[in-house]
Amino acid sequence: MEDILREVLSKIKPSEQEKELVESVKNEVLEIAEDTIKDVNLKVIPYFVGSLAKDTYLAGDHDIDLFLAFPLEINLEKLREEGLKLAKAIGEKLESYEVAYAEHPYVRAKYKGFKIDLVPCYDVKDWREVKTAVDRSILHNKWVLKNLNGKNDEVRLLKRFLKGIGVYGSEIYVKGFSGYLTELLIIYYGSFINVIKNHELLFKQKIIDLEGWLRKEPEISLKTVEREKESPLIIIDPVDPRRNVASALSWENFARFYFRSKEFLKKPSIKFFFPKEVPIGDYKELLRKKGANLVTLLFEKPDLIDDILLPQLEKSAKGFEKALELRGFRVYDSNWGYKEKAFIMLEIDRLEKPKIGIKQGPEFYTERGLNFYVKNERVWIRGRQLFSEKEAANTIVDIIVELLDKNQVSLGKNVRDFIRNAKILINFVPPELKDEAYLFLSKEKWDLKS
């Protein structure tokens, strides 16, 4: 195992030359930011945060996060306005930039091959001063630098392992382990091997309190524990007792980590860190073999960042699942995303249902029974119960169109109009989605053993 970890580390640890390049570019960006701050005469302190600032980044991963910390006395509206103006002024001195949106606007820039996020925030000193979600990042950085104690390479190993098994990233559409969570696990357990060896304890213990908040702030931290009790893991943020660092982690991704850790301990291999690509088969052949059907809604991709777009596509896919099941179809699974266009895929049991539908009504002597009798054409009674028969849309395409026309599908608000104009494809996808369709139908996309 030690030989494997040494080999992995040799691939993921930045060389001294790479570190020198990173520091050189950081210094240049910092100088540009400081000069711009002076030019606009603002009391703003620039802070580097994230993995580059903590020296826990992987070789080749050069995203720079520069936070622009404003005084606490500035109100939030002015922070957003002045912060974006300052970030854009800095971005104009770099190679290129664009405005992106999270809780409030920030700037994504590029400079000498580096991606740079310029994020306005408040210059907070402790959790009581936090006003926006990004404010904690400065506190996170300071806490990790104080407590990591030279375990930087252990963080790198755990990060690469989590990336290799597909559970790294706290984005709302990933629902995995964040970089900060990875660092906290190393600080708590001491090494990558200890984290892997304690993966079952991690599940059973569930609550990790590195800063002793349950003792120092019991009322607040217990509220956090109670609120997060359905989460697979609770790590009370060392800099804020109100927050669970692992709140984004899904049960599915925790399960993948759980099983992969077991497998790695049983048979260590570099493949856990650098998995081979899954061989892609023919999705049409797979459909024939399974006896299932694939319905794909294909539509123009809304101009939204992934943090907004993908959760709304997920909501819409789940909406179709529920609506179609209420119409008598069995939906085995759903998939969503985008390539050239956005898509929602549904694996279903059949493409048609009987044209005639039987509807059970209320008991005949009630007010509702009278309304049922009036509204329906073919009505009969069994015992005291009314029934009716009516023709209904029976093909999957007609039913989806009807569901959309009648607003009977729960759709993401920013993708609703795009989905209404979708093409509905049956057991066929365009060439750019062939691999996606195979991975979805074969379950290789989520297979715990893949």
Image (tube, rainbow, N blue to C red):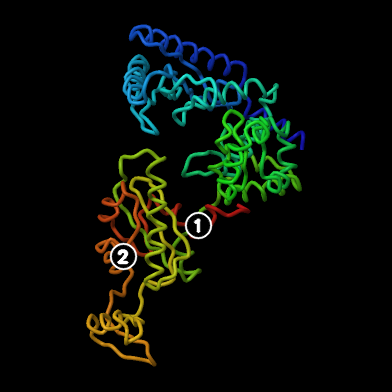
Q: Is residue 3 above or below residue 434?
A: above
Q: Nearer the viewer, residue 39 or 270?
A: 39
Tell me the crowding category of disc 2: few under 14, some 14 to 19, or many 20 or more residues within 10 angstroms, Cα based.
many
| The N terminus lies in quadrant | top right
As shown in the figure, which amino acid type bears the numbered disc 1? Gly
Residue 121: give its label: none
* Residue at x-position 29% and y-position 48%: 300
Q: Nearer the viewer, residue 199 or 214?
A: 214
How far from the left and from the top, in percent, is residue 386? 33, 86
For disc 1, the marked residue is: 281
Q: Is residue 415 above or below residue 74?
A: below
As shown in the figure, which amino acid type bears the numbered disc 2? Ile
How far from the left and from the top, in percent, is residue 358? 34, 82
For disc 2, the marked residue is: 400
Mark 2 and mark 1 residues within 8 Å of each other at the beta carbon: no
Q: Nearer the viewer, mark 2 or mark 1?
A: 2
How far from the left and from the top, in percent, is residue 423? 28, 57
Pointer 2 or 1: first along the chain: 1
